[in-house]
Amino acid sequence: MLYKVTKDEKYATDLKNYCNYVINSSSRTPKGLIFIYDWGPARYAANLAFIFMQPQVRCTKSDYEYGPCHQAADLGINADTYRAEAKKQIDYILGDGGRSYVIGYGDNYPTHAHHRS
């Protein structure tokens, strides 16, 4: 993320505000998947899970002192909440809601994929 490179607090604040907005205010399906758009909602949820996990890079002391690696706590970001939400979204996509959305994964997965590209 840009904060890791620039150390500009604006980017840490923007990231925190965006993640908090998505977690607290986004539409959700009845079983909890964050719902951004009608076509392919799981792709948006998976991308959000990736964003939620970005601030939680594990750092060594030397990384913290010399590199652009910062722990979520150092950013003031609620790492436990973001990790839990990322896991919830990915678990839903993999079948915790009763159906896996990944072909060949789990017990109840799609058997006739439709791809438009």
Image: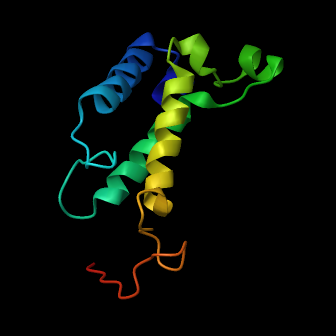
Q: Quadrant of residue 112?
A: bottom left
| Residue 29, image x, y percentages | 25, 49
| Residue 11, image x, y percentages | 41, 20
Q: Is 99 situated above or below 32? A: below
The residue most toward the left is: 38
Q: Quadrant of residue 111?
A: bottom left
Residue 50 appears left or right of 36: right
Residue 8 appears left or right of 24: right
Residue situated in front as seen by the camera: 9 or 79: 79
| Residue 102, image x, y percentages | 46, 71
Please give the name of the residue rendered at 63% of the width and 21% of the height, measured from the top-left corner. Answer: 70
The residue most toward the front is: 98
Please give the name of the residue rendered at 40% of the width and 25% of the height, measured from the top-left corner. Answer: 15
Colouring of the image = rainbow
Residue situated in front as seen by the camera: 84 or 15: 84
Residue situated in front as seen by the camera: 61 or 88: 88
Q: Quadrant of residue 93?
A: bottom left
| Residue 4, image x, y percentages | 56, 25
Please give the name of the residue rendered at 33% of the width and 52% of the height, measured from the top-left corner. Answer: 44
> In what quadrant of the picture does the C terminus appear?
bottom left
Residue situated in front as seen by the camera: 85 or 32: 32
Q: Is 23 situated above or below 65? A: below
Look at the image and tell me whether residue 66 can be seen: yes
Label tally? 0
Look at the image and tell me whether residue 50 can be seen: no
Residue 105 appears left or right of 31: right
